[in-house]
Amino acid sequence: MKIIDWYIIKKYLSTFVVMILLFIPIGVMVDMAEKIDKFKENEVPAGAILNYYLDFTWYFGNLLFPIFLFLAVIWFTSKLANNTEIIALLSSGISFSRFLRPYFISAGVVALFSFFSGMFIVPKSNSSYNAFHYKYINKKSERQTKNLYKQINPKEYIFVSSYDPIRKSAKNFTLEHFEENLMTFKIQASSIRWVDKDSVFRLSAYSKRTFADEGEIYLRKSRLDTLFDFKIDDLSPVNYKAETLTFSPLNEFIEKEREGGSVMINSHLLVRHKRWSLPFSAFVLTLIGVSVSSFKRRGGMGVNLAFGISLGFLFIFFDKIFSVLVNKSNFSPFLGAWLPIVIFGVLAIFLLRRARR
């Protein structure tokens, strides 16, 4: 049986790679056809376009990973079934569960690759991909810039009425410091700007009110250079910030955003949960793929492929629906990431029982 195991593992992984190499160039060509006018209109440099499509490769591959996996499993399993190789194996006394073993080993290899690429490679590509998209294609603001209120640590809160990320400056700055729920001092300034040359914050029309038992102490200055316990970009990170961070920085960023009371905390948590849930989809989709294509049926491989493509897009559809629920409501990020896996896991068990009959 070891020869058969290696044969199935080799076929699984090689077909999966072929699907990636086949569909990613198609995705690149379709995307280029859609954006070619934007490239011309905005006079995008050729080097920037080339780098964009290198990043797009990882973005597109990660997005349609379930489709590639599904098609790979259904394609070569249908070929085995059409050649009556599966019937011959099962007739020789091998159980269906034993027949699934090399499939799950292969799914484990794909899941590990998906996990490590999702944690360490795709985030870096996402950063460049999104930056290019907002600079040349979308041109909408990639972050919130009006009426920003944040908690920067357990004792301090800041507010600005407007923020300019390009100039690294903000208007109508306020910082409030609390000790045991009592405000001890309040800083205000008409503007705050980060000065890279001196590595300091420059405050204009600065004032500080200190509240003490003996009364208030009021201090004013036309300008003050100082340091605070936050970075200027902390005022409003880009909307896709979580998607661009690798494992440890993502955890640190989420904790910081949670402490700061970010309105996007659910979106950030969803990104983290998806990085864990997506690799598990390899096992669920593999089980479904084998269950629907391991026996001959009318219409042959074409019917199996059509069914596989439909289920693959249905999986992506469910994934997107739950993502929207998380981003637009108080729906749990954990459920948003894992419910599609659970739903399709139940479907996989149902199809497996039918295949065993």
Image (cartoon, grey):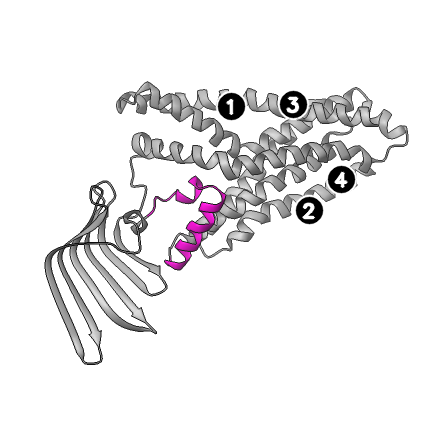
Marks 2 & 1, CB-CB < 8 Å contact? no
Q: Earlier in the sequence, mark 3 or mark 2?
A: 3
**As rendered, which of 320 and 205 lies closer to the eye?**
205
Q: Quadrant of residue 245?
A: top left
* Vertical placement of residue 211 versus 208, above or below: below
Query: Is disc 2 surrounded by few (<14), some (14 to 19) or many (20+) residues within 10 Å?
Result: some
Q: Which residues are magenta?
A: 237-261
Amino acid at dot 1: Ile
Residue at the disc numbered 2: 346
Task: Look at the numbered disc 4 and give the secondary structure of its residue.
Answer: helix
Labels 4 & 1 near each other (Cβ < 8 A)? no
Residue 113: x %, y % from top left: 59, 33
Residue identified by numbered label 4: 352
Q: Which residue is mark 3?
A: 15
The residue to which callout 1 is attached is 24
From mark 2 to mark 4, how far is it between C-alphas? Answer: 10 Å
Residue at image location 50% in from the left, 42% down from the top: 320
Residue 4 appears left or right of 255: right
SS assignment for the magenta stretch, majority:
helix
The correct choice, above or below, for 67 with respect to 214 in the image is: above
Earlier sequence position, callout 4 versus callout 1: 1
